[in-house]
Image (cartoon, helix red, strand yellow):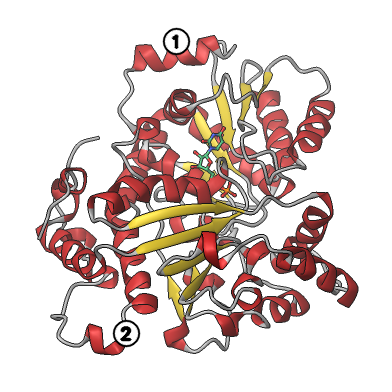
Amino acid sequence: MRRSAQLDQYSAYIGEDVLTTIYNKADKLRGIHVSHINTTAHGGGVAEILAELEPLVRDFDIKHTRKIIQLDEKAHDFTSSLIGLLQGGQSGDISATDRDNFVDWLGQARLSEHDDAADAYIVHDYQLVPLAQLYDWMKPAAWFCHVDTAHPNPHALNYVKSFLDAYQLAIFNTELSVFPDLPTNFSQVMILGIDPFQRKHAPLEHAQGVKILQQCGIDVHRPLITQVSRFDPWKNPKQVIDVYRLVKQQLPEVQLAFVGAMTATDDTGAVDVLHDLQHYADGDTDIHFLSDPAIVGDDQVNAFQRYSSVILQRSLREGFGLTATEAMWKNQPVVGTSATGLRTQLVDGQNGYIVDDTATCAERTLELLLKRDLWQRLGTNAHEHVRTHYLLPMMLLSYLDALEKIYLTPSQQTGIESQVTVSDIDPENTASLAD
Ligand code: UDP
């Protein structure tokens, strides 16, 4: 069993038995080539997950390659309306013509068996679900759903399900998003996790963090509310401004920051959302928009998540919401909504708040701004919750489980000793390590 120095760093967090299970699973998969296919190289949760897994799987001799299928404007229009339906925000249907046009577009040799063949394929997100059916050499394949499908419009659900036969497995971020009626051995919940050794989440001295905020135009002597997110209507940024305005009536010195570097190439609507939001801010110089990727990098995200006075995540829908996990790791009690991924992570009143309406959200935010003992206590719980549930090795174990399911044939699996799986990890029995 060859060990990975990077993974071994986690022994203080998760215990040796889990590490051993990971190594045993990885050994069975050593040498395979997995192709990940998605719509953007940078920005957003998918890119984040792949970047985190990459160095670890390299240590296991599992080769990852990325294939990006960049959507054109028409394809983007189709998928924007599809996500509106799939996440349940809108009623309506998918026209047969729109569906056929999009599927034809995807089928126009965007992939070739000659150049893109691998031992296993992971197709990311709702946009690309037709791929395994279109390219029948793409086997074995798993479809990985990253969006919030807890309340799908039935037409959108049927659209996605009509392509699933070509897959061996469908992966979801949370139990709540798993489509009803899928055979149990066809679906898997893959726990997401963050890597505390990554620069974005590494310890950052207070003085250094404050300096970074200052460089971003923040007055560090006044309280700051922040939401870190892509500029996307599903992240509900207008409500963030409404909440800030209510808080400002009680606490005039408060400031607001939106941190959303525009790096995702599949996020073509982001510029419009930002402009709309700037218009809504109506010249308020205490509202800061940080969207330039030349200015907002890992250190800036780290500083805002760590040293803002309160972190909001007001998403209307959320598959998981890594931004919440990241802030919680940095001792922030996030004021979130009941969106699927957020209510999975947050325990209301214990490690943050789950609140949907603007007025109550403003009350909670003000409370956290004024009662710093409460903020600190909930923040400590938030950090602990992430330590015990959402660190990278838990995600890695889920990922290896998925690869095992799709790649290893039953005969190859015979003889694998009974091993710990993610659901067997007892968070209470894992060792602790200070951030
Ligand atoms: N992110 C970032 N810079 C930014 C804004 C976001 O690196 O300016 C990252 C953030 O740290 C997180 C990811 O983008 O890791 C967003 O993932 P999430 O699951 O919250 O939302 P998604 O974008 O996938 O909807």
Q: Residue at x 63, y 70 (%)?
A: 131
Taking depth in this image into account, of 316 and 137 the one nearest to the observer is: 137
Quadrant occupied by the N terminus: bottom left
Quadrant occupied by the C terminus: top left
Residue at which label 1 appears: 211
Disc 1 residue type (three-letter)? Lys
Disc 2 residue type (three-letter)? Thr
Q: Residue at x 33, y 43 (%)?
A: 195
Q: Quadrant of residue 184?
A: bottom left
Name the spot of residue 232 as percent of width and height, x first: 71, 44
Task: Give the vertical position of 144 relative to 10 (above or below).
Answer: below
Q: Is residue 159 left or right of residue 179?
A: right
Q: Is residue 242 left or right of residue 169?
A: right
Query: CA–CA distance between discs 2 and 1?
Result: 54 Å
Task: Give the vertical position of 36 relative to 300 (above or below).
Answer: below
Residue at which label 2 appears: 409
Question: Residue 355, can we see it?
Answer: yes
Name the spot of residue 156 as percent of width and height, x first: 74, 74
Task: Give the vertical position of 235 relative to 365 (above or below).
Answer: below
Name the spot of residue 364 as percent of width and height, x first: 56, 40
Question: Residue 346, can we see it?
Answer: no
Secondary structure type for disc 1: helix
Secondary structure type for disc 2: loop
Name the spot of residue 25 as percent of width and height, x first: 22, 68
